[in-house]
Amino acid sequence: MLRFVSMLALATALALPVAAQTADKPAEAAIPAPNRVVAKRAGTFGGIKMNYTAIAGETYLADKDGKPTAAIFATTYLKDNPEPNRPVFFIFNGGPGSGSLWLHMGAFGPKRVNIPDAKDDGAAPYDISDNPESLLDVADLVFIDPVGTGWSHALGKTDPKSFWGVRADAESIAQFIRLWLNEHNRWNAPKFLGGESYGTTRSAAVAHELNKGYNDVALNGVILISAILDFSLEAEDEGNELQYMGLVASYATAAWYHDKVAGKPATVEAWAAEARAFASGPYIAALLKGNSLPADERAAVRKQLARFTGLSETYLEQANLRVTPGRFYKELLRDRGLTIGRLDARYTGKDYDNAGEGPDNDPSFYGIDASYPAAVNAYLRGDLGYKTDRSYVSIGGVGPWDWRLGQGRDAYVNVAPGLARTLRENSRLHVWVGQGWYDFATPFHFAEYSMNRPGWPAGRTEFHYYDAGHMMYVRQQDRKKLSDDLRDFIRRQK
């Protein structure tokens, strides 16, 4: 009898927690199947009429045990009845924390939103039209939203923060690319990878992951739009003289655009070349002398710096020959009561007052911030018919971001060496770089310097320049030039 009671008590003890758990804490909800839509469309791109298939939806990443960890939302465009081994171009934006809507709806997708150049985009309705500059005539296109952006999100109990870091982010995008190649049987296709802003950092990191990964995905081209690979160059730290050297040419082009240059040269290209030579020669030499800089050399450098930047010698002396970007945005057009943009210095804004040290906001961001989210939602939910209750995250708070690459907790990230190694180990890989003359988010001189160091193979990187800022495609002429330049690059590398 005692044995029976003991067995009954044991059974009760084992059963009760399960019942209590069922009542008080429901089991984890089952993960639904990936949400996708497929649509057949036709258009004319690069002057070529074609039929294509649009696929908007989720691809699930999984852990080593096969458990889904994240849903990556992407929009894929596939040419119908393609030629063998047609190129494929994987595209994302930056941030970190930005969805792919900017390049999708602004530059390379089959539809685009049309906004006024260097002016505020106003309010809806916005003009969404066919995009004849889309690259769909030369490559299939895959627009990718990393976890925490767009409609991409962690699944189940997976912490989204596990994807938020240079290395973790690159690993997740590399996993998505391999899954996409499996699904569409495109392993032998020429492959291109590209992004904008932090998307260029991601491009270098993903290229490195694909090169060293277990499947060794060899790329034909890496496309860097408004590149930033070495964050140490732009660090606004006391004693970092390189930050000032790399900014002089951008200060010069902004001053040139706003007619703050005496005896203004005919072209911005010529002016930028002069500014680069000054910055990497007499200017950086003077800064490196620190307190030992002779007075006559200081006066000569100050005079030249005033000529290039459009700022007064008095102001430059007060700034100790070292002007930070925020001060420049406010000071350049202070006499006109205007500030200039960070993403695009052609944009101007008006602050609450004219006495501050820096601008209230970036007029080149609030000038475009509403049109792109409206366009991507209208297009994906309307034209393609994608259904979801989630909000599309155009700029998300994917933090804290883990910037470490094995360089130590406080090191600035530099992905240039990884991309250089990938170039050395893949003889067919070429790098294409596009920079706007008026971009202060990723200044062109920093990009040039980071890809002109020992270990970077010569002759396999090409630079192209545009008469706009960070998002050069907001200017109609540069959108076409960007498309034509990349179309040519893809054709040459495949």
Image: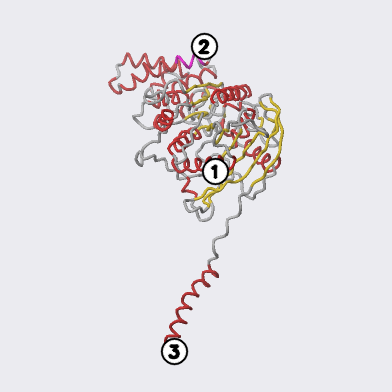
Query: Which corner quadrant holds the C terminus?
Result: top right
The three-letter amino acid code for the residue at tag 1 is Leu
The residue mark sitting in front, 1 or 2, is: 1
Q: Which residues are magenta?
A: 269-274
Q: Which residue is at a point 37% across and 32% down the rendered structure image? A: 237
Percent across and percent down for residue 226 are 51, 28
Q: Quadrant of residue 319?
A: top left
The residue mark sitting in front, 2 or 3, is: 3
For label 3, the residue is 1
Q: How many marks?
A: 3
Residue at the bottom extreme, as displayed: 1
Residue 115 vs residue 62, the one in the foreground: 62
Marks 2 and 3, how far apart at CA: 105 Å
Residue 315 vs residue 385, the one in the foreground: 385
The kind of secondary structure element at disc 1 is helix
Q: Is residue 377 left or right of residue 395?
A: right
Q: Is residue 123 left or right of residue 287?
A: right
The three-letter amino acid code for the residue at tag 3 is Met
Percent across and percent down for residue 101 are 60, 37
- Give the mark, 1 or 3, whose residue is nearer the N terminus: 3
- Give the mark, 1 or 2, whose residue is nearer the N terminus: 1
Residue 330 image label: none
For label 1, the residue is 179
For label 2, the residue is 265
Percent across and percent down for residue 46 are 66, 25
Marks 1 and 2, how far apart at CA: 52 Å
